[in-house]
Image (cartoon, helix red, strand yellow):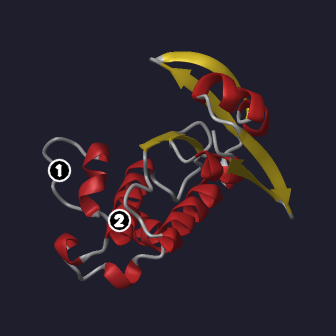
Amino acid sequence: MLLGRYAHKQFTDFRFSAEDKNIVEESMNETSITALADKYIHELSGGEKQKVLITLTLVQLDITKSLEGKILIIDEPLTYLDVNYQFEIFDILRRLNDRKLTIVIVIHDLNLALRFSNKTILMNSGEMIKFAHTKDVITEEVLKEHFEIESKIMHFEQNFFINYLPG
C-alpha cells in the first residue's frame, strides 16, 4: 500500500513518513482490509483484490484530507464478484461519495445503477445520448428505444428494479 504514496514523493526520496503510514492505515480502515495486510495478492479472492485496488487509490488520493474536488474513475468494479462483494464495494464507494469524492463508474448492470447512482450518462457508440438523474435516464421508454427491451420498472420500499419482459 505504501507504494501508492510514491506520487507524493520527490524522485530521490524512498523513505516513508509517519504521515504516509497513517494515510495507508486510514485507507485500509475505510475499506475494511486491515485483516488482509499480511497476505499476498495471489491469496486473495476477487472481491478482496478489488477492495485492495480501491484502497490503493485512496492511498494516492490521501483519504486523511478533504476529498472534495477529487475524482475517482472506476471501470466495471463488480466484474466477476459475488453479490456480497458487489454490495461491499458500492457501500465503500457510497461512503466516499458522502465525503464529497466524485465517483465516475462504468457499469452495465442497470439495476445496480438504479440502486446506487445519483446521475447517469447513457452512451451509444462513444456518444452521450442522455445525462440526468439516474431515475430520469433509466426509464422504460429509454430501455425500449436504446436497448430494444420491453420492461417494467418496479418500486419496492426505497429501491427501483427493472423487470425485463419477454420480447
Q: Which mark is residue 82?
A: none
Q: Quadrant of the N terminus?
A: bottom left
Residue 161: percent from left, percent from top: 73, 53
Residue to which mark 2 is pinned: 52
Tell me the amino acid under the disc marked 2: Val
Left or right: where 62 falls relative to 112: left
Callout 1 secondary element: loop
Q: Give the left or right position of residue 101, taking residue 114 as reference.
A: left
- Relative image position of residue 59 (x, y in whole percent): 39, 57
* Residue drawn at 23 percent across, 80 percent down: 39
* Figure quadrant of residue 158: bottom right
Examine the rendering and report whether any part of residue 18 can be seen: no
Residue 20, quarter of picture? bottom left
Mark-to-mark CA distance, 1 and 2: 24 Å
Q: Who comes first in sequence, dot 1 or dot 2?
A: 1
Name the residue: 32% across, 66% down. 49
Give amino acid for label 1.
Answer: Asp
| Pick the front one: 56 or 40 | 40
Q: Which residue is mark 1?
A: 13
- Within-10-Å neighbours for mark 2: few <14, some 14–19, many 20+: many
Quick check: can you spot residue 13? yes
Quarter in which the C terminus is drawn: top right
- Looking at the picture, does residue 33 appear above or below residue 118? below
Looking at the picture, does residue 36 appear above or below residue 124?
below
Categorize mark 1 by other alpha carbons within 10 Å: few (<14), some (14-19), many (20+). Answer: few
| Residue 123 drawn at (x, y percent) | 54, 23
Q: Nearer the viewer, residue 15 or 68?
A: 68
